[in-house]
């Protein structure tokens, strides 16, 4: 029995390695849609907190609104992964999901800054929260099939390169998405003033419109420039393993704790950076004040910096993993990110927050690539989408935990000082760094 199972696993590995290597530009084209996805995701991350606070959300309740993102991701991604494994249309296996997700996300991007104009039906705050849920669900429809496509198309020795190219494109999209409100407001003179309480400034609104355009355009690029292997070839590749029962690869289990503390940290950072910077460096908690909007614009720049750093470092990851191994590379990156977040406590000038963004960018580059590169070699190709969708729970569950408890921690333990939530995120990164060293990856 064990010999049979070992034989089927060896057969799978041989078929993976039999896939032809792709050129850099072929890998670029198949992942190009991720640039648009991350453009929209960056607009959401950089602006959702201030939009919700503009609509009247209390800082203690911010994390509750953000909960809709991981909850929808936890539900949507395994379902999309499962059905994308079984789908075959004229557009292929994964590409139909790219297109549907892009259309829905673009609609949500256009509607979200206009939530006050829908207030005849619901309070703007709840309209905004609902659109945040729709936006994240739609992003998830597109996102996970992109992860699966890398493992579908590339031989094992190119997996790290494939996920690194995705990280590069994620970084480029996120930089543009994060910086656009600042650029429109400060360089092109588009109004940064909300005009009236409860309205979203024009520079943010137009950024969301442009994000919708970029998302659709980049997804269409991938759809029309990339072919997928037909189901007959996938069937041949996995015939030796089709009678195997469902199992969870050991490396997936080992990654769970690392992912938990990594994404707990990221969620806290995304939710609380804007109110933290507004309070400590701009001296305000009034979400409708000009100072608060300036803080939000500056946070967009900072988030763009860390995403830019991740893009620059992305293509160095295959080199680093050959030198240090995947788990050691990941551990170092997470530790650097932890120190960067802890430094928020001692920095006195908002301009110097650019420095810790470098460390966060290093951690982000690794988070986007290394766990998937460690995992991809252990997953049956025919069920790649389902396994990647299930693995997404290691991302959504820590965000849900953070969303439930971080507001209470802020109120009762941190005396309403959101900077301490950023410090908590730094400590979480450092814990993840130590746990990463305990991962036992299979021998190549």
Image (spheres, rainbow, N blue to C red):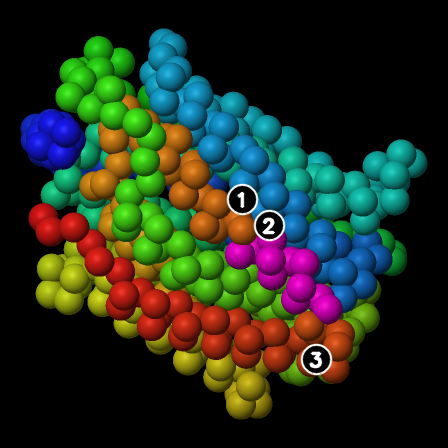
The residue sitting at the right extreme is: 120
Above-or-below relation of 351 to 93: below
Q: Secondary structure at mark 2?
A: helix
Sequence-wise, the earlier of marks 2 and 3 is 2
Cα distance, mark 2 to mark 1? 6 Å
Residue 174 x, y percent position in the rendering: 46, 53
| Tag shown at residue 430 | none
Q: Quadrant of residue 314?
A: bottom left
Q: Secondary structure at mark 1?
A: helix
In the rendered structure, which segment of residues is drawn in magenta? Answer: 398-408
Residue on which disc 1 sits: 40
User: In the shown orientation, is residue 26 left or right of residue 157?
Assistant: right
Vertical side of 240 occupied by 413: above or below? below
Q: Is residue 248 above or below residue 292?
A: above
The disc at residue 413 is: 3
Q: Residues within 10 Å of mark 3 (few under 14, many from 20)?
A: few
Q: Nearer the viewer, mark 2 or mark 3?
A: 3
On the question of residue 168 being in view, the answer is no
Label 3, label 1: how many angstroms apart (C-alpha)? 34 Å
Give the dominant element type of the magenta stretch: helix, strand or loop. helix
Taking the image as drawn, is residue 4 in sight?
A: yes
Residue designated by label 2: 44
Seen at 49% across and 28% down, the residue is 79
Q: Which residue is rendered at x = 60% and y = 53% of the image?
A: 400
Q: Position of residue 308 (x, y in %)?
A: 38, 61
Tell me the crowding category of disc 2: few under 14, some 14 to 19, or many 20 or more residues within 10 angstroms, Cα based.
many
Of 306 and 323, the residue lying toward us: 323
Q: Are marks 2 and 1 in contact (CB under 8 Å)?
A: yes
């Amino acid at each position: 029995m064990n010999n049979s199972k070992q034989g089927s696993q060896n057969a799978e590995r041989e078929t993976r390695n039999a896939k032809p290597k792709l050129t850099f530009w072929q890998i670029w084209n198949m992942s190009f849609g991720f640039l648009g996805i991350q453009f929209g995701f960056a607009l959401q991350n950089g602006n959702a907190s201030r939009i919700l606070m503009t609509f009247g959300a209390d800082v203690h309740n911010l994390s509750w609104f953000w909960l809709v993102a991981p909850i929808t991701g936890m539900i949507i991604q395994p379902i999309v992964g499962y059905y994308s494994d079984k789908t075959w249309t004229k557009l292929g296996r994964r590409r139909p999901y790219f297109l549907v997700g892009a259309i829905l996300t673009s609609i949500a991007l256009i509607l979200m800054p206009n939530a006050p104009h829908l207030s005849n039906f619901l309070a703007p705050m709840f309209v905004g929260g609902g659109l945040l849920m729709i936006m994240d669900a739609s992003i998830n429809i597109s996102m996970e099939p992109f992860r699966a496509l890398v493992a579908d198309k590339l031989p094992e020795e190119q997996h790290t390169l494939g996920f690194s190219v995705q990280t590069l494109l994620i970084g480029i999209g996120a930089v543009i998405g994060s910086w656009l409100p600042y650029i429109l407001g400060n360089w092109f003179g588009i109004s940064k003033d909300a005009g009236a309480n409860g309205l979203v400034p024009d520079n943010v609104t137009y950024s969301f419109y442009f994000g919708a355009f970029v998302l659709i355009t980049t997804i269409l690029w991938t759809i029309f420039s990339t072919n997928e292997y037909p189901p007959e070839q996938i069937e041949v590749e996995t015939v030796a393993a089709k009678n195997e029962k469902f199992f969870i690869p050991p490396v997936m289990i080992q990654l769970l704790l690392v992912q938990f503390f990594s994404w707990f940290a990221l969620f806290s950072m995304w939710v609380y950076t804007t109110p933290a910077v507004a309070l400590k460096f701009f001296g305000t908690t009034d979400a409708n004040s000009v100072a608060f909007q300036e803080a939000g614009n500056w946070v967009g720049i900072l988030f763009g910096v860390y995403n830019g750093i991740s893009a620059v470092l992305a293509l160095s990851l295959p080199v680093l993993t050959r030198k240090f191994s995947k788990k050691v590379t990941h551990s170092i990156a997470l530790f650097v990110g932890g120190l960067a977040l802890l430094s928020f406590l001692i920095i006195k000038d908002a301009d110097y927050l650019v420095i810790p963004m470098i460390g966060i960018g290093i951690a982000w580059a690794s988070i986007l690539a290394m766990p998937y590169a460690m995992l991809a070699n252990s997953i049956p190709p025919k069920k790649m989408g389902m396994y990647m969708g299930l693995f997404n729970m290691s991302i959504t569950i820590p965000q849900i935990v953070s969303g439930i408890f971080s507001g209470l921690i802020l109120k009762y333990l941190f005396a309403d000082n959101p900077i301490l939530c950023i410090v908590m995120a730094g400590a979480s990164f450092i814990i993840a760094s130590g746990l990463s060293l305990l991962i036992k990856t299979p021998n190549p």
